[in-house]
């Protein structure tokens, strides 16, 4: 145990359904106020070596229904650890030690994700100090705890990228930030410019950046944790601000479009975590970065552009830009003949209409890959749900006389499905592929207390780490 007699140090214990706990030869009895409920915390003061001990309710994992498709025991640990950290932090504890709770990795994830606050632009004297969170010396599972800290800190990095205002996170700044952070983790980071993209004939990608004064960038990341010949390809949408272009968005909540590069943030943070964990996988990341802005140079509704694979696209709505930048990124990723491609994007508001704010939508051309990412989501608590890739949706995107594709579907509804059908046209048929639409879990989510109900989440990065670690080795 830690003992700092001159510091404000707190320790977190957990309970299931009993109301009596033994700690450091002290008997804590909650009979006066009842047992601690799941996800709640109660603080006891001046007990032995620690000025404060937070007892958090672990709850009953069996209360998670099988239809919830989640490992309830692990999820309850994340919730409990977060509750304890927040309770002690709100009482000015500067250092906190956490029990293993029989799931040390998940305890680390909940504690680390809860011990986060975006305040980079507040005056120093108005910032809230965050406590140092560590692992109790007498707890078991230190290696698992360390793994959980690495993964959660990488997710917090994604949250910072997504939360940072767009004037402080332009394509160039994003690229420089990623290069500095990931190069230190033994990841090769290449930053390609617009001239390179033109040479590659990425007309679809470059059409989106026409209206912006900020130059586009294209990140190519390589982590070689194995000697596999084929890589896993991760593609992330990197729109650092999305005004909608000429098809201008409504002004209400447009500020949230600073996080329209959530897919890019997930890709770079996933690769960062894999590198720091020394995962035995070979992964490449592809991140097209640009702004979508209106100006006299901006792409106009009805314009026709060409993607890297030669297909022509009529841009009927410039606010359906994510699929345009991903199209060329998918084409480029395909040139490396990967094991499989996964693209991830805050792509459609339709996915939030369909699924709400608690799950990411996944479209997959391969059943085994779907099963693997579905299981990964159950283990991490950041769940995914399969969506259809029917030919019906492809016909809505491709059945046109004057050009190959339209960036809007012909029919009404099914916006996330038609967007996925559009992307499918830029992946070789013999390449297994998954598309993950994360617009619903981008921010202000109500289902995970440890990431909070306000702000950008960095989700579902932990699911990607779990998925790639296992599927990438198959």
Image: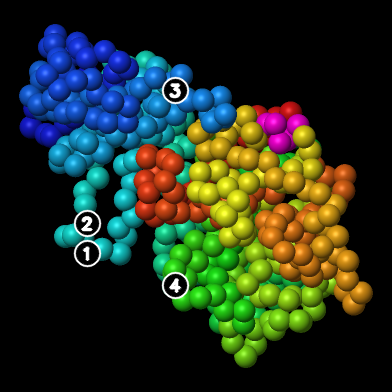
| 308 on left or right of 356 | right
On the rendered image, what quadrant is the C terminus found in? Answer: top right
Secondary structure beneath dot 2 equals loop
Q: Residue at x 76, y 81 (%)?
A: 302
Tags 1 and 2 touching, CB below 8 Å: yes
Where residue 446 sits: x, y (%)?
42, 46
Secondary structure beneath dot 3 equals helix
Q: Which residue is mark 3?
A: 63
Q: Quadrant of residue 4?
A: top left
Q: Residue at x 31, y 42 (%)?
A: 115
Q: Earlier in the sequence, mark 3 or mark 4?
A: 3
Q: Earlier in the sequence, mark 4 or mark 1?
A: 1
Pick the front one: 21 or 410: 410
Label 4 Cα neighbours within 10 Å, binned few <14 / some 14-19 / many ≥20: few
Q: Earlier in the sequence, mark 4 or mark 2?
A: 2
Which label was assigned to residue 123? 1
Decide if residue 366 is in sight here: yes
Q: Earlier in the sequence, mark 2 or mark 3?
A: 3
Q: With respect to residue 276, does 352 lie above or below?
A: below
What is the spatial separation of the Cα atoms under label 1 and label 2, in whole angstroms? 6 Å
Q: Which residue is mark 4?
A: 252
Secondary structure beneath dot 4 equals loop
Decide if residue 272 is in sight here: no
Q: Residue at x 58, y 47 (%)?
A: 355
Where residue 100 sits: x, y (%)?
35, 20
Q: Quadrant of residue 215?
A: bottom right
- Toward the top, the furthest residue is 25
Q: Which residue is mark 2?
A: 127
Where residue 354 sits: x, y (%)?
60, 51
What is the spatial separation of the Cα atoms under label 4 and label 2, in whole angstroms? 28 Å
Q: Which residues are magenta?
A: 368-372
Q: With respect to residue 65, does 123 lie above or below?
A: below
């Amino acid at each position: 145990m830690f003992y700092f007699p001159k510091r404000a140090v707190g320790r977190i214990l957990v309970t299931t359904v009993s109301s009596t706990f033994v700690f450091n030869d002290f008997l804590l009895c909650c009979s006066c106020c009842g047992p601690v409920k799941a996800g709640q915390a109660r603080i006891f003061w001046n007990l032995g070596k620690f000025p404060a001990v937070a007892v958090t309710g672990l709850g009953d994992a069996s209360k998670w229904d099988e239809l919830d498709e989640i490992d309830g025991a692990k999820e309850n640990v994340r919730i409990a650890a977060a509750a304890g950290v927040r309770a002690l932090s709100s009482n000015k504890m500067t250092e906190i030690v956490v029990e293993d709770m029989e799931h040390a990795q998940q305890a680390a994830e909940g504690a680390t994700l809860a011990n986060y606050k975006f305040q980079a632009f507040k005056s120093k004297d108005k910032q809230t100090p965050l406590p140092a969170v560590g692992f109790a010396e007498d707890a078991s599972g230190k290696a698992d705890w360390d793994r959980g800290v690495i993964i959660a800190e990488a997710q917090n990095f994604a949250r910072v990228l997504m939360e940072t205002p767009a004037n402080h996170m332009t394509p160039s700044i994003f690229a420089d930030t990623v290069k500095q952070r990931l190069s230190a983790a033994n990841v090769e980071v290449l930053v390609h410019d617009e001239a390179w993209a033109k040479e590659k004939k990425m007309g679809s990608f470059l059409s989106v950046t026409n209206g912006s004064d900020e130059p586009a960038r294209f990140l190519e990341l390589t982590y070689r944790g194995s000697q596999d010949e084929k890589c896993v390809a991760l593609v992330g949408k990197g729109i650092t601000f999305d005004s909608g272009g000429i098809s201008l968005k409504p002004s209400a909540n447009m500020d949230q479009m600073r996080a329209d590069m959530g897919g890019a943030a997930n890709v770079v943070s996933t690769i960062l975590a894999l590198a720091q964990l020394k995962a035995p996988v070979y992964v490449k990341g592809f991140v097209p970065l640009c702004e979508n802005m209106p100006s006299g140079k901006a792409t106009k509704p009805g314009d026709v552009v060409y993607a890297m694979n030669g297909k022509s696209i009529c841009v009927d709505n410039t606010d359906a830009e994510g699929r345009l930048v991903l199209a060329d990124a998918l084409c480029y990723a395909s040139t490396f003949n990967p094991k499989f491609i996964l693209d991830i994007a805050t792509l459609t508001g339709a996915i939030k209409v369909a699924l709400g704010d608690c799950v990411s939508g996944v479209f997959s051309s391969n059943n085994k890959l779907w099963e693997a990412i579905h299981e990964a989501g159950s283990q991490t608590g950041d769940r995914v749900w399969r969506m259809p890739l029917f030919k019906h949706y492809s016909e809505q995107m491709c059945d046109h006389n004057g050009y190959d594709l339209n960036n809007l579907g012909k029919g009404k509804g099914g916006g996330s499905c038609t967007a996925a059908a559009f992307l499918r046209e830029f992946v070789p048929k013999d390449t297994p592929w998954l598309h993950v639409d994360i617009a619903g879990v981008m921010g202000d989510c109500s289902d995970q207390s440890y990431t909070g109900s306000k702000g950008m989440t960095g989700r579902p990065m932990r699911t990607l780490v779990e998925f790639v670690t296992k599927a990438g080795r198959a």
